[in-house]
Amino acid sequence: MQIGKNKVVQIHYTLTDDDGEVIDSSEGGEPLEYLHGAGGIIPGLEEALEGKSTGDHIQVHVEPEDGYGDQDDDLLHEVERSQFDAVDELELGMQFQVDTDDGPMVVTVVEITDETVTVDGNHELAGVALNFDVTVGEIRNATKEEIDHGHAHGEGCHEH
Ligand code: ZN
């Protein structure tokens, strides 16, 4: 079976940046399972996997525009420090979920002064070129329910 639209695919992967630093890996754990053609993984990787079969091994270099996008300065926001009064020890790198006009968004604290806090809503991998080393695992047809939901359903409990 080949990877194509409406196939559920398992992949074993290691993700590194251009310095060879490992960002993420499925090694030693469960493979990642996704529904192909549903935008569940980044476009550059999904495209490279199209037509591949179980056991195939690919290496893909994905530029930011086909990955998590470029850094967007519009997603930097300066807010009153008093808005964080409820946080015991505010530190750089802390992440919070905030409600925006576009729905919930995770922001990271990137600057703290006496009066203000700057938060960054960019994905932590925005602007980063990604190198995937992928081995294709099992491939199966998606169920009707999975296609309706637009994502793969793993084994065990599924609550929605
Ligand atoms: Zn579902």
Image (cartoon, rainbow, N blue to C red):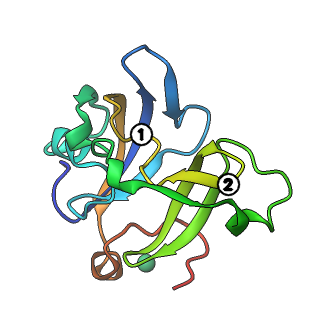
Q: Quadrant of residue 121?
A: bottom left
In depth, the one of 102 and 23 nearer the eye is 102
Q: Which x, y percent locates residue 133?
A: 36, 26
Query: Residue at (27%, 76%) from the top-left corner?
Result: 147
In depth, the one of 155 and 105 nearer the eye is 105
Q: Which residue is mark 2?
A: 115
Asked if residue 134 lies left or right of residue 52, the reply is: right
Locate ligand 1 by image quadrant: bottom left
Q: Does ligand 1 reach within 8 Å of label 2's beta carbon?
A: no
Above-or-below relation of 63 to 73: above
Q: Secondary structure at mark 1?
A: loop
Q: Quadrant of residue 126?
A: top left
In depth, the one of 128 and 92 nearer the eye is 92
Between discs 2 and 1, the one toward the N terminus = 2
Q: CA distance from mark 2 to mark 1?
A: 28 Å
Query: Residue at (66%, 45%) from the top-left corner?
Result: 112
Q: Which x, y percent locates residue 79?
A: 57, 62
Asked if residue 35 lies left or right of residue 96, the reply is: left
